[in-house]
Amino acid sequence: ENDIVSKLPLIGKKILITAGPTYEAIDPVRFIGNHSSGKMGFDIAKIAAQNGAEVILVSGPTHLDLQHSSVSLKRVKSAQEMYDACFSYFSSVDVAIAAAAVADYKPKNVANQKIKKDETTFIIELEKTKDILASLGKVKKDQFLIGFALETENEIEHAKLKIQKKNLDLIVLNSLNDKGAGFGHDTNKVTFIDKNFTIEAMDLKSKEAVAQDIINKIILHYDA
Ligand code: CTP
Ligand code: CA
């Protein structure tokens, strides 16, 4: 038995992480997507694995890859596929972290053939996708459930509402008002809010350092 490995704080813990954008098909060659790179979720997965956890990383389309013997990477495209993957693993995990930028809406009808540019204006009717995180919150037993919130106004209030609506233990609030934070950046400035509404504002730091802060919250949860 390796002494160093057995002392890692998340040994024996299984963590489900969502990452990246989702792509919602319009027709066979087009989709609705977003600019999420997947970096935040992949960094969390890497740090979790380095701390001894067994990780299931469910990711939407991204150029990133992660090779680690304790990380199992499941690639999906749409919100529905991400939902199905998450539900197949959730009952077996201790912790779930929703870092994906899931599309809120998808085309109501997907065309079987490539849509031709016949009309001068074109309307696509959208319907809501399933809220993966809220659905996990509904069925959770003793899983530690962590969500993200991306807000541009009344950030704290909106994030608190998401904690309640989705039955979360912790939310990682991403404020787009902060320069150098969020999409397309390698840095992030987050505020942690727990289910008791205890607020902790963190400094601007690399996404990898934010990932370490999130993992530290999980370690603290199991230490307490
Ligand atoms: N989320 C999810 N499934 C969705 C939408 C969001 O799992 N269909 C998760 C995200 O991964 C994130 C959290 O819910 O952890 C919050 O996402 P966010 O976009 O900030 O909030 P929404 O609940 O989608 O509400 P809105 O976009 O209207 O602010
Ligand atoms: Ca959303």
Image: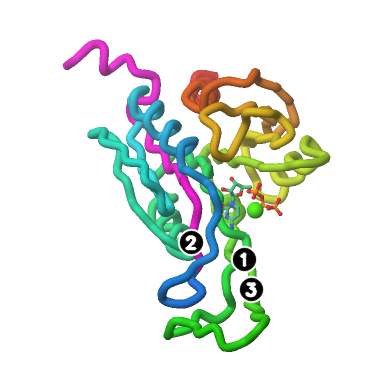
Q: What amino acid type should be assigned to the residue bearing mark 1?
A: Tyr
Q: What amino acid type should be assigned to the residue bearing mark 3?
A: Leu
- Residue 44 vs residue 137: left or right? left
Precedes in sequence: disc 1 or disc 2: 2
Q: CA distance from mark 3 to mark 2?
A: 13 Å
Splitting the image into 4 quarters, where does residue 154 fall?
Answer: top right
Q: Could you tell me which secondary element the residue under label 2 belongs to?
A: loop
Quadrant of the frame with the N terminus? top left
Q: Which residue is mark 1?
A: 105
Q: Which residue is mark 3?
A: 126
Start and end of the magenta stretch? Answer: 1-24
Residue for point 19% across, 15% down: 2
Q: CA distance from mark 1 to mark 2?
A: 10 Å
- Residue 5 vs residue 51: left or right? left
Precedes in sequence: disc 3 or disc 2: 2
Q: Which residue is mark 2?
A: 23
Q: Could you tell me which secondary element the residue under label 1 belongs to?
A: strand
Observer-nearest residue: 117 or 95? Answer: 117
User: Do residues under tags 3 and 1 come within 8 Å of each other at their CB atoms?
Assistant: yes
Residue 162: x, y in percent? 71, 46
Badge number at residue 168: none
Residue 136: x, y in percent? 54, 52
Observer-nearest residue: 149 or 216? Answer: 149
**Magenta residue check for 164:** no
Residue 3: x, y in percent? 23, 11
**Magenta residue check for 14:** yes
Q: How many marks?
A: 3
